[in-house]
Image: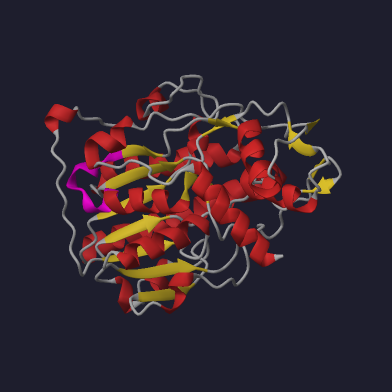
Amino acid sequence: MPTHTLMELSITYVKDQTMKVIVTGSQGFIGSYLCNELLDNGYHVVGIDNYSKYGEVSRPHDTHKNFHLIKEDISTCTLEKLSSYEILKDAQHLVAGAAMIGGISYFHKYAYDLLATNERILANTFDLALLLKQEHNLKKITVISSSMVFENCNTYPTPESAIESSPPPSSTYGFQKLSSEFFCLGAWEQYKLPYTIIRPFNCVGIGEEEALGEEEVYSGNIKMLMSHVLPDLIHKALLLDKENKMPILGDGNQIRHYTNGKDIARGIRMSLDSSNTINEDFNISSSVRTSVSELATLVWNKIHGCDPTFEHCDPFEYDVQVRSPDVKKAKDIFGFEAEISLEESVEEVIQWMKNRV
């Protein structure tokens, strides 16, 4: 991916208060945060989603006057039908966030389906973007990739440039996310469609439901609520008394950078606002390294007021030990830094999960 030095760049914002953004996957986890962020900052948003991940859940942005939902399965919807929606034709940006996705167990239970479905989603999304660029006024496509493109990277903290030298991902999910980045490169090379690639790291927050079709996974004798670490740890801590041991997967030394969905959404929105993000890739993440055992201790303390005793269970077969990004590029080019602490995120998700019980 092309890079620039700080000396070559000045942060330039091109925000238009009437800007319209298409968001595929608008009813998903990150998609919902992004819609809220865009609407709160004066954008008009058209979502495209078919509720395939969680079922027909309600989202805070659903009733906003500047939000419109097109309920379509973009993996199968024809370009002819998509292009018939008049509301899409004056959009300036398209954020490609739709994907078949779940936790680690989901990646491997549906290894082929995930790869095939997500490739169809991407091809149809890029076909729509190319049409809107050629016949209307689309300025750019922003692709939501994943930290999983660095699944086999061993450079930490991982800069964006490591994508050039890292071994390819082992999982079909990681490989498909890498493929999404090559869609950007190909569409630029052939059709000069400008792009930005966003790689979120370990999004946490409220609204993360269990994916439909998620495989049952047990940690100790407790069925995991979902195969994402923070809601799972909170789920277990709420079920157990403080005298119980807390089950965690593996040795607890797995490293992540847990980033609140509001921060990730703000980073995506800021990348839309900046003219310096064209044909660039960015890690969007907190700068704080946290081990699973540190996160589990924080959760247990918030719920029980003491440190836990751990019961170490067999880890996921395909778990990644370290995901640790370099976040300097996003700060230098468009001024993004994560602001919400992990403690705040944990408190928010605990309260949300308590209210759901």
Side of 171 relative to 264 (left or right): right
Using the image as rendered, state which of residue 264 and residue 87 is in the foreground. Answer: 264
Horizontal and vertical percent for residue 190?
Answer: 27, 44
The structure residue drawn at horizontal position 46% and vertical position 33%, both measured from the top left corner, is 288
Q: Which x, y percent locates residue 275? A: 18, 47
Please tell me which residue is depicted at 60% across the width and 72% down the height of the picture: 56
Given residues 131 and 66, the one toward you in this image is: 66
Please check the rendered image and state whether residue 15 is part of the magenta-colored stretch, yes or no. Answer: no
Residue furthest front as drawn: 305
Q: Is residue 148 visible?
A: yes
Q: Quadrant of residue 165?
A: top left
Image quadrant containing the C terminus: bottom right
Question: Where 199 falls versus 23 (above or below)?
Answer: above
Left of 290 or right of it: where is 306? right
Closer-to-camera residue (294/156)? 294
Q: Is residue 313 visible?
A: no
- Numbered label tally: 0
Q: Residue furthest right?
A: 221
Q: Is residue 133 left or right of residue 222?
A: left
Instruction: Measuring from the top left, give residue 356's x and y in whole percent.
Output: 67, 66
Report the magenta residues as a range.
271-280
Residue 99: horizontal and vertical position, in percent? 52, 54
Majority SS type along the magenta span: helix
Residue lying at 49% horizontally and 37% vertically, measured from the top left:
147
> Which quarter shows the N terminus?
top left
The answer to whether residue 41 is above or below residue 258 is below
Question: What residue do we see at 71% from left, 57% from top?
Answer: 213
Q: Considering depth in this image, is 301 or 14 the residue closer to the camera?
A: 301
**Which color scheme is applied?**
secondary structure
Q: Is residue 278 magenta?
A: yes
